[in-house]
Image (cartoon, rainbow, N blue to C red):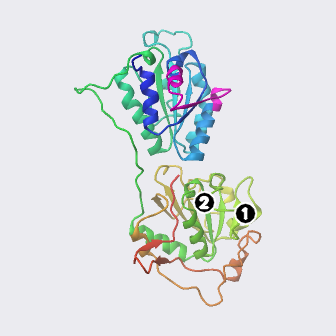
Amino acid sequence: MSETVSDFLVQRLHDWGIRRIYGYPGDGINGIMGALQRAEERMEFVQVRHEEMAAFMACGHAKWTGEVGVCLATSGPGAIHLLNGLYDAKLDHQPVVAIVGQQARAALGGSYQQEVDLTTLFKDVASEYVQMATEPSQMRHVVDRALRIAQAKRTVTCIIVPNDLQNEPAEEPPREHGTIHSGIGYSRPEVVPRDDDLRRAAEVLNAGERVAILVGQGALAATGEVVETADVLGAGVAKALLGKAAVPDDLPFVTGSIGLLGTRPSWELMTGCDTLLMVGTSFPYSEFLPEEGQARRAAFRSTSTPRGSASATRPRSTWSVTAPPRCERCGRTWNARQAAPGESRSMRTSTTGGRCWRSGRCRTPIRSTRSASSGSCRSVFPTAAS
């Protein structure tokens, strides 16, 4: 049997590193289901009880593994059921690709049974990329772009495949005008602030006496940097819900969650600070943050989600970064200072909510560290990406 468009679709996903698809069968995706059965040794299909669960599970897969989550549903009502889980992925900035069926191309526009304008339906949740394939040779770049954009933007993308196209013979795009020849693979760029911005960050934080840090999911890959910065600054660390795993709860200066289900130490941390550093979070509840005018504010935002970062804080300074930093010049921006005699950071505990600030004994200016063997600098300032 010659390779079909559906076989090519499954193989292309495999070439991108996808090994699992969450979905629910339907006659609008029979061709793809047949390809999955033929590729069962290479691609696992997890059949769910409902399409909505397929989207939620794909989102959970992305959160847990760091990979792109993929979900599959049939046309019409099956595709509609995906939306709730896909919005969860979009709003939590997780890379998920939705693959849905559609009625035969010849019937489109004729109000055929269960015909839904899926391109319009998914235009919001998959606003960065939603495309219906209409030619076999188109499938290559549609799959490549959907996966690459999902990773680059950390968002939802959507591929629509009419059911008659699924069983047509697969074709590579010809080498002629009007065709696209895409490739496989994506490498996330690393971004660091400019030297001037880093100096401004140091000035803001070094000027504070009672520093609080709030971390979100953008700090998940920067645990070491967050812990070391908190230690240097004598700061307490509160965590937004999606940043709960960014730093361990058993550290003495971690006050736990913040917000509607937050802890009293986190509340005291925010109401008592004079400087707030937000890392990789778009925490929305301003009533749980310091009142305007109370604290200097600085935010490190993710390069992938700059629009939502620190939206409730009106920070004095905001920088785009990726995490963790691996640029030697970052370390050269800080003024190295030693702790004054008698300073102690052991006074900070999660039960005091930063009470050591009032004693003035646990404050150490931010500094750089230098390796004696290599001579290289590394910053103890945390940076993060969502």
Q: Position of residue 129 (x, y in %)?
A: 44, 34
Segment tinted magenta in the rendering? 33-53
Q: Who is closer to the viewer here, 32 or 326?
A: 32
Looking at the rendered structure, the secondary structure element under dot 2 is: strand
Q: Quadrant of the N terminus?
A: top left
Residue 48 covered by magenta stretch: yes
- In which quadrant of the rendered view does residue 275 lie? bottom right
Does the residue at mark 2 contact the one at mark 1 (Cβ under 8 Å)?
Answer: no
Q: Who is closer to the viewer here, 282 or 45?
A: 45
Residue 358 higher or lower than 221, as above or below: below
Q: Is residue 146 visible?
A: yes
Q: Position of residue 348 (x, y in %)?
A: 70, 75
Residue 386 higher or lower than 197, as above or below: above
- In which quadrant of the rendered view does residue 344 lie? bottom right
Q: CA distance from mark 2 to mark 1?
A: 14 Å
Looking at the image, tell me whether mark 2 or mark 1 is earlier in sequence order: 2
Q: Which numbered circle lies on residue 226?
A: none
Q: Is residue 117 visible?
A: no
Residue bearing mark 2: 215
Residue drawn at x 45%, y 37% is: 147
Residue 379 higher or lower than 58, as above or below: below
In front: label 2 or label 1: 2
Residue 286 higher or lower than 42, as above or below: below
Label 2, residues with CA under 10 Å away: few <14, some 14-19, many ≥20: many
Residue bearing mark 1: 267
Q: Who is closer to the viewer here, 49 or 100?
A: 49
Type of the residue with mark 1: Trp
Type of the residue with mark 2: Val
* Residue 140 as seen in the image, left or right of residue 384: left
* Residue 19 as seen in the image, left or right of residue 48: left
* Residue 49 as seen in the image, left or right of residue 297: right
